[in-house]
Each structure stands twice: as C-alpha cells, then as structure tokens.
Amino acid sequence: MVGRVGPAALDLTEAHRFPNRPVRLAEGLRWDVLGLYAGVLDGLRAAGPVDSVGVDGWGVDYGLLDADGRLLGQPVHYRDARTEGMERTAWARVPADRLYAATGIQHSPINTLYQLLAAQGTAQLAAARRLLLIPDLIAYWLTGEQGTELTNASTTQLIDPRTGTWAHAVADRLGIDLALFPPLRRPGDPGGRLLPHVRESTGFDAPVTTVGSHDTASAVAAVPAAAGERFAYVCTGTWSLVGLELDGPVLTEPSRVANFTNELGVDGTVRYLRNIMGLWLLQECMRAWGEPDVAPLLREAASVAGPRSVVDASDPAFLAPGRMPERIADACRAGGQPAPSTRGETTRCILDSLALAHRRAIARAQRLADHPVDVVHLVGGATRNELLCQLTADACGLPVVAGPAEAAALGNVLVQARAHGVVGDLAGMRELLVRTQPLVRYEPSGDRGAWEAADRRVPGD
C-alpha cells in the first residue's frame, strides 16, 4: 500500500496484492515466509520510489536465526497444534493469576510464550541465536538491522505493560532466554535503510521507519475518533479485536477471568481488548463451499430472520481449519438451537454471533475498566459488510461508525509521516482521518430484547 500524506491530504493506493498460503509439512503447519518476502519485494517494485517504508503484520509468530543471521526453517503457524496443553506447563511454573498480573495478556494457546515452551528441547531452538517476530524479520531482510517492535512484542506475553519492558522474572521462571530478542524499538524509531541488493531489486533507496508493527496497533491508531470522544473499537478481519484504548493496563483478577488482554499501542496507549474468532468463521465456510462470491451470501443472510441461532465466536473450538459449516451446525445443536441448513442461514448465524460477541466484549470492557463509551468505531475489512455493521449497532445498542477499511495500512503510513515531520500527534493523525476518509454511521435499530435473549442462549461471559 502506498500512502500519500500532507497537512490536508491522506490517500492510500494498493500497489500489489499477493496470496498468503501456509504450508502443511510432516512436522506441522508452517508459514511460507520466503514467499511472503518475495511478495513484499514485488510490492516495493510496484510502489516505485517512496520516502519511507514501514512493515506491520500479525503477532505472536516468529522466525529463528542462527549465529550467521540465517533463518532456521520456515516459521511455525500459530494454528499449529504444538501448543496444546502448554498452559499447564506454564502455570506449573508461574500460576495463571501471577502471569496475568505481570504481563496483562489473555490466555491463548497461540501466544509466543506457549510456542517457546513447546519448542524447548528442540534442536532448532538450541541452534537459535536470535528470534524475530514476523514484521521484524521482514524488516531485517530489508535492512540487515534487527529490532523488536514494542506493540508486537507485547503479544508475546513476555512484556510488562506498566513499564513497556521485558518481564524478566516471568521469563526466568519459564526458562525463556530473553537474549534471543534484539533490543526493543518503538513506533517512529529509525529502522535502517534498504540494503544494496534490495535497492537494486526495487529500484530505489529509502529508510525503513518503525511503525506499530502489530497490525491491530496500526489499525487502532487509525480509528477516526473525534477529540474527547468516548469510543470502543472493533478491528475486523480474520480476527475481531474488540475493546478500548486506555492510558494504562487493567491487571485485576476479574479482567483475567474475563480473558481481556492489555496489548501496547502507539504513544504508550494500551489496547485493552478481547480476541474474537472474526471473519475466519465465514472465510473457512466459503473455502468449504468452493469460494463463492460473498455478495449473494450476504443478501441471502439478510433475508434470514435473526438472531435465530448463535454460537460463541470466542470458542477455541473454532480455531483450527476444516469442516467449519458442520462444526457451526454441531455447536448450534449442542446449545439446543436450530442448526443452519443453508449457506444463507450459516452466514447469518456467523454474523449474528460476531455481533453478539462484539456486544459482550464492549459491555464487559466498560465494566472492567470503568470506562463508559458512547460510540463504536468499526475499522478493517468488515466495514464493507453493511449487514455486520448494522447488526453490531443493533446488538450493542450504540451507534457504529464504519471506516476506514484499510485502517492498519493508514495507521502504518501515518506513523511514518509523523516520524518524518508531516503530521503531528495521535490526535492530529485522527483529525486528518476524520477529514479525509469516507465514514458511514449506523444507528441501532430492531428489538433489543431479541439480543438479550440471544445473549442468554450462548454460554460464557
């Protein structure tokens, strides 16, 4: 994505799009990170000369380098089964309540902490001299310089969210060597310049600027909130990340039990949120159905009365790929609800379930953080899904402002622009977003009682 930023202008253009195809090997599920890096180089060539490059991506996963800085195998995919049962290993060394009090990160089997526990004793980890989170790995290949960007580092469950530094006591108790990580960087820090062979491949030279390299950190930075607005956010895509932007973490026992996470954001903010399975549910169904066009599915779903059948979209049972329509139907039957029998009914079940999960997370976050909100900002890919936007407004009983769709890319380029003196602080970045980006407002409608009844039908929370 190429961003063009000025005092009164903010434009984003797609330069190149390429697939991300994980590979299942005999040893498990792996990312094709070399294929991704090749796509990045293709994208830089297509983008043409730029003033700065910033890299963001997903959290928790990493690549290991040997003493010569060479990659030790393809990075393990967070949906790989190797972390099953690792929480018991972790909690035997650091009890769950103490682990949360020290790191503020929700329990999730995909966290880097559990991945490293699963890797202990392997030849690969023994040979490793450096660990780079995925965006940091791409930046390293572009520049030859190594760093650990803080917003992404917070997803490892090895950072103290109060200080923004490593949680050394936790790592020591777990036997995790923090010396594997290069020094911490923060959004806006210099990240090096393109290497000679990268300059030759892409046709230009430019600095790499550290951004909020966790894509959700970049997306939250691009929430178009007005000054003084009390807002919740829903960052949508494969996952729905639902929560609040706070000045400090919430490390209470009720927060831990509710499985809220305290990830770090741009400018020392805290992303207090809950991870929900997101549009992964629909993506997996569409794969099972042979990749149909989404528009007819949404029209059919809109014609189905709801909320008729709902499932817990936060349930780890939906984490693995495969047989998603059948698994959703089974979950409905297990909950004593009608099982969807058509693609439209399944799609409506997914969207109603996501809207219900958004409602639950926002309501719980307000109580736990004592932080009331008046509006929900929905950013990311689902801004194009009018039905989900309206259902979220209906379920939450709050207005939903949808947009921008490419929030992560916009947050990325705005942090770069600020580092180069083009825009001001976080409030100034958001004011520019409000003035330049198309936004759609959805007012709550329908029967609030129907959502309250649906809430009672789904266990949890």
Image (tube, rainbow, N blue to C red):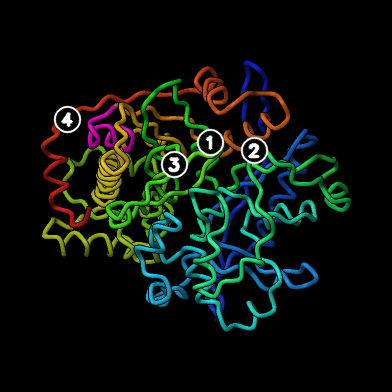
| Element under disc 3 | loop
Q: Is residue 233 depicted above or below 180 in this figure?
A: above
Q: Is residue 372 left or right of residue 233?
A: left
Give the residue type at disc 2.
Answer: Met
Circles 3 and 4 in contact, beta carbons < 8 Å: no
Give the residue type that dot 1 points to: Glu
User: As displayed, is residue 225 above or below residue 205?
Assistant: above
Compare residues 437 and 167 and report the one nearer the observer.
167
Magenta residues span 388-398
Whichever of callouts 3 and 1 sits on the residue coming sooner in the sequence is 3
Q: Which mark is residue 446?
A: 4
Q: Which mark is residue 1?
A: 2
- On the question of residue 351 being in view, the answer is no
The answer to whether 44 appears left or right of 361 in the picture is right
Q: Where does residue 451 sit, x and y in percent of width and height?
A: 16, 40
Identify the amino acid type marked 4.
Gly
Residue under label 3: 248
Q: Earlier in the sequence, mark 1 or mark 4?
A: 1
Q: CA distance from mark 1 to mark 4?
A: 29 Å
- Residue at (59%, 26%) from the top-left corner? 425
